[in-house]
Image (cartoon, helix red, strand yellow):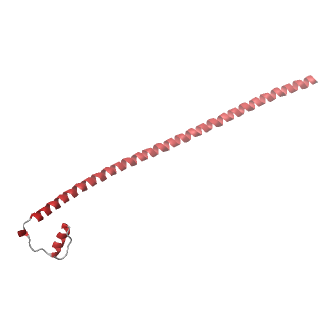
Amino acid sequence: MPAVISLTLGFIRGRAAQLVGVGVLVAALGGGYLYVSRLHAQVDAAESLAANATAAAAAAEAALARAQRDHARAVAALEAERAAAEKRSAELREARRKVEAAPEADDGPVAPVLRDALEALRGGGGGDA
């Protein structure tokens, strides 16, 4: 009888070792599957972030192009206004030069409102004289 018990215990031990081995194998496969699944999820998240970053970069590039066009238009408008202001200033200087160089014989009576306007342009203010 001890031989039968010994044989039975040996069989059970062998079976237990097989079951433990199978359990370890199943656990390893399950862990590997979970690890690979997590890696796939991380790759998907990284691809999504990359797509969002690419879209944001394209939008920023388009906004920069619009801003550069707006800036160029504003600079052109300012340059045109500067040129017009320089032309007006030159015309005013020429008109003042002609007035100051005119002989006294060309002077005559001027309506008070016109005199005040001319004095204001000259920078002397207005008022009764």
* Residue at point 59%, 37% (across, down): 40
Against 18, residue 128 (above or below) is: below
- Across and down, in percent, residue 123 comes to 20, 67
Up the image or down, 70 lies above or below 113; here it is above
**Which percent across, then down, holds residue 58?**
43, 44
Q: Is residue 112 above or below residue 58?
A: below
In this orientation, which residue lies closer to the viewer: 87 or 14? 87
Q: Quadrant of residue 17?
A: top right
The spot of residue 74 in percent (x, y) is: 31, 53
Is residue 30 toward the left or the right of residue 40 in the image? right
At 65% from the left edge and 37% from the top edge, which residue is drawn?
A: 34
Task: Give the side of residue 2 with respect to residue 127, left or right.
Answer: right
Residue at 84% over, 26% down: 11
Q: Residue furthest top?
A: 3
Residue 77 sits in quarter: bottom left
Q: Residue furthest right?
A: 1
Quadrant that contains the C terminus: bottom left
**Which quadrant of the figure has residue 93?**
bottom left
Foreground pick, 87 / 18: 87
